[in-house]
Image (tube, rainbow, N blue to C red):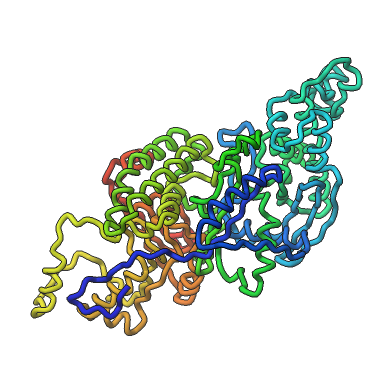
């Protein structure tokens, strides 16, 4: 942006350049697929300017890295943790990110099991463990089924019937044992039938029985330690679970059974990355990575329960063989808006698409239908770039693939909402270097230059201006919070700085307000057309506190309708928008182009 331009010059000029973003790439694969990994490295690194790849190993404490990684994902990735409810309408119920994550119990299931009590960022203690873990499942599974692949063992287990192998309560007592509170279908003895039944058992049934046995054992251990240390938040991590429904259901059932619902089993979308993330943070301590916030990049990350690697490594495909996580470093810390009435219960989104199949299909269809228009707009924004068409086509393919994934796995990236669909589209556009497709947006009527010329002439005697600057006239301080980066056609903080400078040169009210610091322009830390009040620029939160803000105005479809329609604030608020989507208007009880002017006063201030 050119701040030195004269009034007669264009407002600003944008030069397209490769945006430099600090990004973490994590790739997870079994050792059996090392050749596929080498292919990936060759395709993505060797054929670029990088000619030499160095591999280094620094010895770090495994448990320290594990806890650092767990704290990191819980603080930085929205909807990282979830509850698994097999028979609910939505099997996955995601938890909101909250800065107060301590204390918690981490059950890390690798080859064995480590049980760690975490009380603060650098205060944790290994309080127990077990030698019966993922390695046990893999080892015994290999002996029982002659299957050497971990993923194949899980697939076998998902097809098996454990009741063919396990002895149940009803097999012993003929039904439930009511006086002890034991149901007839409860496992009385894992593999019990194999000792008395003279027959061959299928690989699938044995794998299922083995998975139940180990998962139940881990669940019971977790319960005992949680009760012993009076902890209610129990996270399960490691590379054993892998988002496998049978494993998660068994552990959840075990936890509920032994604690009578007092303790909740929580799983992590990125459970297999904790140690690697922690190792990075340990190595980057001199750069103080904790001074930044990080965000998951949906364009480059695999979703929860992504396609497993090909079982036959000879026929390995280069897509779908890895589980991947990409995280972008944001140049500012993101925090809660201090004016949220209850940050722990704040949900930014108006409609949850994970739980509503009809709503989900409608919005996925909307975004698919809009894709051609977005591609055209992206090309038009860089029409002088020779490879823009090729990059735009790659964007189309990437985003369409994401939409198809979300149609079949709506829980892939946490809660699915209009906001997450918009954010995914922005991430995909950025990946192919279209940071601002609306930078050269079409004008229906363009008399901008004539108006600029008119402003050089004598001032008007009186102007009727249908915009509200009465707040400034009334003596109210005003903070304008705008996007840090471009999204759709929303104004960014950089643009707003330039616009305000120009307006101040013509308007004495704005000029005086700026001079007296009654008008402040602050970036909100977002590059989204929606607004998540739990992830705002720390500077904005500080300004809100210092100025004693007692009114919040949220304007527009993305910020006031798609998000924050039901948000409860601790001060007066205005939510203003015109509803430009007929489906959403009907869902909220209105009609298309209905006006929303929602004035809310918190209950404690109403008296």
Side (left or right) of 40 relative to 69: left
Q: Residue at x 56, y 36 (%)?
A: 90
Residue 293 in the image: x percent, y percent? 55, 65
Taking the image as shown, residue 450 lies to the left or right of residue 230, namely left
The vertical placement of 486 against 592, above or below, is: below
User: As displayed, is residue 195 above or below residue 340?
Assistant: above
- Depth order, front residue of 380/91: 380
- Where is residue 63 drawn, in percent x and y? 77, 59
Q: Residue at x 27, y 72 (%)?
A: 499
Along the line of sight, the residue nearer the viewer: 68 or 515: 68
Image quadrant where one finds the C terminus:
bottom left
Q: Is residue 56 visible?
A: yes
Residue 481 lies in quadrant: bottom left
- 3 lies left or right of 210: left
Q: Which residue is pictured at 42% across the width and 46% down the height? A: 418
- Total marks shown come to 0
The N terminus appears in which quarter of the rendering? bottom left
Q: Position of residue 271 (x, y in %)?
A: 67, 49
Viewer-closest of 323 and 582: 323
The image position of residue 154, as x and y in percent, is: 71, 34
Q: Quadrant of residue 139?
A: top right
Q: Residue furthest right?
A: 195
Evaluate whether residue 296 shows in this view: no
- Residue sitting farthest toward the bottom: 515
Note whether 157 is above or below 37 in the view shown: above
Q: Nearer the viewer, residue 25 or 590?
A: 25
Q: Residue at x 28, y 46 (%)?
A: 594
């Amino acid at each position: 942006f050119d701040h030195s331009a004269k009034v007669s010059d264009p407002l600003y000029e944008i030069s397209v350049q490769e945006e430099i973003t600090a990004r973490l790439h994590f790739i997870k694969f079994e050792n059996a697929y090392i050749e596929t990994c080498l292919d990936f490295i060759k395709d993505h690194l060797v054929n670029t300017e990088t000619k030499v790849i160095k591999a280094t190993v620094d010895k770090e404490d495994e448990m320290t890295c594990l806890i650092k990684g767990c704290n990191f994902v819980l603080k930085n990735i929205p909807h990282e943790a979830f509850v698994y409810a097999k028979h609910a309408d939505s099997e996955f119920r995601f938890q909101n990110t909250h800065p107060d994550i301590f204390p918690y119990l981490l059950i890390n299931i690798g080859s064995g099991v480590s049980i760690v009590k975490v009380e603060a960022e650098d205060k944790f203690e290994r309080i127990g463990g077990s030698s019966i873990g993922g390695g046990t499942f893999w080892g015994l599974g290999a002996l029982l089924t002659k299957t050497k692949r971990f993923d194949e063992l899980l697939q076998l287990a998902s097809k098996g019937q454990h009741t063919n192998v396990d002895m149940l309560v009803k097999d012993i007592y003929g039904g439930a044992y009511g006086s002890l509170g034991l149901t007839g279908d409860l496992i009385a003895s894992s593999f019990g039938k194999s000792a008395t039944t003279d027959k061959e058992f299928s690989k699938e049934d044995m794998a299922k029985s083995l998975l139940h046995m180990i998962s139940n054992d881990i669940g019971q251990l977790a319960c005992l330690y949680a009760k012993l240390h009076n902890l209610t938040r129990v996270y399960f991590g490691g590379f054993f679970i892998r988002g496998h429904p049978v494993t998660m259901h068994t552990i959840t059932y075990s936890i509920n059974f032994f604690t009578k619902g007092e303790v909740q089993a929580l799983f992590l979308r990125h459970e297999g990355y904790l140690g690697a993330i922690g190792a990075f943070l340990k190595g980057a301590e001199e750069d103080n990575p904790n001074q930044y916030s990080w965000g998951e990049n949906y364009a480059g990350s695999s979703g929860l329960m992504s396609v497993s690697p090909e079982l036959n490594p000879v026929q390995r495909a280069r897509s779908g063989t890895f589980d991947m996580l990409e995280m972008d470093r944001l140049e500012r810390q993101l925090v809660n808006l201090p004016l949220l009435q209850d940050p722990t219960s704040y949900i930014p989104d108006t409609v949850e698409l994970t739980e509503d199949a009809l709503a989900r299909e409608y919005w996925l269809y909307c975004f698919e239908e809009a894709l051609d228009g977005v591609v055209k707009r992206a090309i038009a924004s860089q029409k002088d770039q020779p490879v823009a068409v090729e990059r735009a086509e790659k964007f189309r393919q990437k985003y369409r693939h994401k939409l198809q994934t979300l149609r079949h796995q709506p829980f892939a990236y946490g809660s699915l909402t209009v906001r997450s669909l918009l954010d995914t589209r922005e991430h995909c556009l950025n990946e192919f270097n279209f940071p601002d497709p609306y930078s050269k947006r079409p004008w229906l009527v363009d008399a901008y230059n004539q108006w600029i010329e008119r402003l050089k002439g004598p001032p008007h005697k009186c102007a009727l201006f249908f915009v509200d600057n009465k707040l400034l006239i009334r003596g109210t301080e005003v903070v304008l919070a705008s996007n840090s980066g471009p999204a759709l056609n929303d104004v960014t903080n950089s643009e707003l700085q330039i616009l305000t400078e120009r307006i101040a040169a013509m308007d004495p009210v704005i000029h005086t307000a700026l001079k007296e610091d009654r008008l402040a322009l602050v970036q909100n830390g977002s590059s989204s057309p929606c607004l998540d009040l739990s992830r705002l620029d720390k500077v904005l939160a500080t300004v809100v506190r210092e100025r004693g803000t007692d009114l919040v105005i949220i304007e527009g479809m993305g910020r006031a309708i798609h998000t924050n329609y039901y948000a409860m604030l601790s001060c007066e608020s205005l939510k203003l928008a015109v509803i430009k989507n007929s489906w959403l208007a009907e869902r909220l009880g209105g009609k298309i182009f209905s006006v929303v002017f929602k004035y809310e006063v918190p209950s404690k201030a109403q008296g």
